[in-house]
Structure formats: C-alpha cells, structure tokens
Amino acid sequence: MTELTTIQKIAVMAAPMVFAIVLHEVAHGWVAYRLGDPTAKEMGRLTLNPISHIDLFGTVLMPLMLFVLTDGRMLFGYAKPVPINPAYFKDPKKGMALSALAGPGINIVMAVASSLFLRVVMTGLEGNVPEPYWSWIAVPLTLMLGYAVVINVVLAVLNLIPIPPLDGSRVVYWALPDRQAMMYYRLEPYGTLILMALIMMGVLGKIMTPVIRPLLSLLLGDGGL
C-alpha cells in the first residue's frame, strides 16, 4: 500500500483502532448479557459510544507511544474492561470463557468484513465514481480498511494468548480442573508485566507472527499493507 508518514498513519489508523477495541469490549458484555449477566447493560457499557469505553492510557497514550517508538511497526491498546459478574452464569467458568471468546470473535468478523468491503465494494465502485472525487475518497478509505484488517487480526490473535488476563486465559481456566485453574489464575496480577516483557524482548512478535502472517495473506493478499 501507499507509503505514509507517521502523522498520516496515525490519521488513518485511529478510527479502525478505536472501533476494533470498542466492539471487542461490547462483544464481551453482550454475550455475558445473553448468558444472564446484566452488569454491563446496567452500567451502560453495551454501547458503541467510544467515550464509554476509552481508557486514557490503554486506548490513547499506550498505542501512540508504541506506534511512535517502533516507527509504526507495533500497535497495542485496550479499552476499559467491560464488567462481568460470573455469579449470574449457570456455569461460571463456561460463561466467562464464552464471554471472553466473543471479543476475539468479533475482531475476526470485522477483519473479514473489512477485507470483503475492500476487495468487493471498493473494486466495484472504481470507475463508477468520477475523478477527482474517487481519489479523494478511495485512498484514505482503502488505507483505513486495510489497517482495519491488520488491527483486528492482531487484536484477535493477541487476546487469544493464554496469559491472564487475556481472553485466551479464560478458555484455559475453563478447561482446567478447579484446583489447577485457581493456581493458574495466580498469574493474573503479573500478566501485564509478562506481556510488556515479552514485547520488549521481541518474543511476543515471534509468537504471533506465524499466525498473523497467513491470516493477513488470506485477507489482504500477498501485498499486505
């Protein structure tokens, strides 16, 4: 795709990033609500209004710092976690696992939808919209859709890593016997530190790349971004 300056990249990546994070959290709360937990709904978190979900550090400052420090090679962020009370679930461990999987699940859905829009709709519109309007609309929209695919795939794969409190850890917790599950979840207070250490050492990228690369090749083609 078109080579962009850092400021241009931030401009076309901001909306896809916020949208991906917000829908990720809403999906957690919506599935929890469908399973019997009204907590997120009662707290006004089943909304697409980003103001209800944005965390100043996780949604704004951290992605910006990582983006600038790595020259756009790394982007990671999070929103305020949607509150879930497992006491409402008939099977708390299963309910937490299903609610957790909803986040990466919706990110994969958005990645596929963005890819289809990019490949089908944008291709169909090309030649039917007069210049210079087409160039003015197509370039930024194409870039935003491309980055939407990348961001959603990265968020899905990252969150499926089984390090508490990432979503993948809820699935592991569900699969483990109760005693082992409790021992496993003692890692949760240190999860963020473990993740940051893996990022700084370059290990996280090596773990994620073998999964991310074929997915992006499938959704974006060999050219990628």
Image (cartoon, helix red, strand yellow):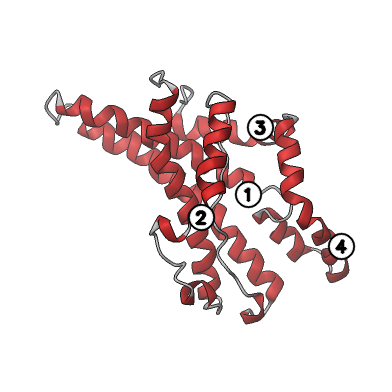
Q: Are marks 1 and 4 in contact (CB under 8 Å)?
A: no
Please tell me which residue lies in front, 69 or 111.
69
Q: Which mark is residue 159?
A: 1
Please tell me which residue lies in front, 182 or 64.
64
Instruction: Say few, some or many: other residues with alpha carbon within 10 Å of mark 1 (under 14 / 14 to 19 / 20 or more).
Output: many
- Mark 2–mark 4 Cα distance, whole angstroms, equals 27 Å
Q: Secondary structure at mark 4?
A: helix
Give the left or right position of residue 72, taking residue 123 as reference: right
Q: Which mark is residue 210?
A: 3
Residue at image point 41% right, 18% down: 3
- Residue 193 vs 124, above or below: the answer is below
Label whose residue precedes the other's in the sequence (3 or 4): 4
Q: Quadrant of residue 188?
A: bottom right
- Mark 3–mark 4 Cα distance, whole angstroms, equals 29 Å
Check disc 3 and give the amino acid type.
Answer: Pro
Q: Quadrant of residue 124?
A: top left
- Mark 1–mark 4 Cα distance, whole angstroms, equals 21 Å
Q: Secondary structure at mark 1?
A: helix
Q: Are marks 1 and 2 in contact (CB under 8 Å)?
A: yes
Check disc 4 and give the amino acid type.
Answer: Met
Q: Position of residue 171 (x, y in %)?
A: 70, 60
Q: Which residue is mark 4?
A: 183
Q: Are marks 3 and 2 in contact (CB under 8 Å)?
A: no
Label whose residue precedes the other's in the sequence (1 or 2): 2
Residue at image point 55% right, 58% down: 80
Q: Which residue is mark 2?
A: 24
- Mark 1–mark 3 Cα distance, whole angstroms, equals 15 Å
Label whose residue precedes the other's in the sequence (1 or 4): 1
Check disc 2 and give the amino acid type.
Answer: His
